[in-house]
Amino acid sequence: MHPEHKMQTDQAIKAFSQSEKLKTGLIWGNQIVEAYVALPEHEKPGAERILKILVGMIASEIHIAKNAAPHDKWLEAEKDLSTAQVMLNSGAGHDTGHHLTQALSKITTIGQQAMSLLVEQKLL
């Protein structure tokens, strides 16, 4: 977010809400990646399908958040999710955790900025 594009209160509420939801999904996604890595080969396809569904849902939510509460970091997180989807589709599911963690970091930043604004305005 550029300094001259400070979040408005309604955007901060939406950004904070979406960031909390997305952080949960990304943490769950990372846990599924960890479980996936430990699974025997014959069980990996099922875990991979679940991970693809979850990553797709998270990507959709980021798209919604990007439109509801514009912020530069949503686009960056969206790119991380896109890379994770490419890795999953190419059979490299074990490497998606890094990209989910990168998205988590960016979304956490958005949530912290939104929360700071809401605290400053005594709304939180």
Image: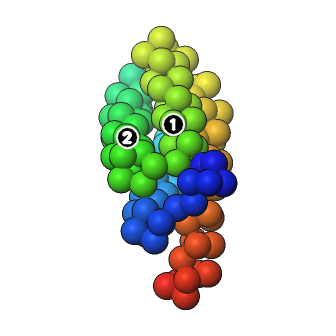
- Residue at point 53% right, 23% down? 83
At 57% across and 60% down in the image, what residue appears?
6
In percent of the image, x 46 and y 71: which residue is there?
9
Vertical position of residue 104 compared to residue 36: above or below: below
3D distance between C-alphas at marks 2 and 1 = 8 Å
- In percent of the image, x 63 and y 48: which residue is there? 2
Q: Residue 81 or 76: which is nearer the viewer?
A: 76
Callout 1 amino acid? Leu
Q: Quadrant of residue 101?
A: top right
Residue 62 in sight in this render: yes
| Residue 48 placement (x, y as % from top left) | 41, 27
* Residue 43 point in image, percent of width and height: 42, 27
Which residue bears the numbered disc 2?
63
Q: Residues within 10 Å of mark 1 (few under 14, many from 20)?
A: some
Q: Is residue 2 above or below residue 83?
A: below
Q: Which residue is mark 1?
A: 75
Label 2: few (<14), some (14–19) or many (≥20) C-alpha neighbours in 10 Å: some
Q: Is residue 55 above or below residue 69?
A: above
Q: Nearer the viewer, residue 15 or 26?
A: 15
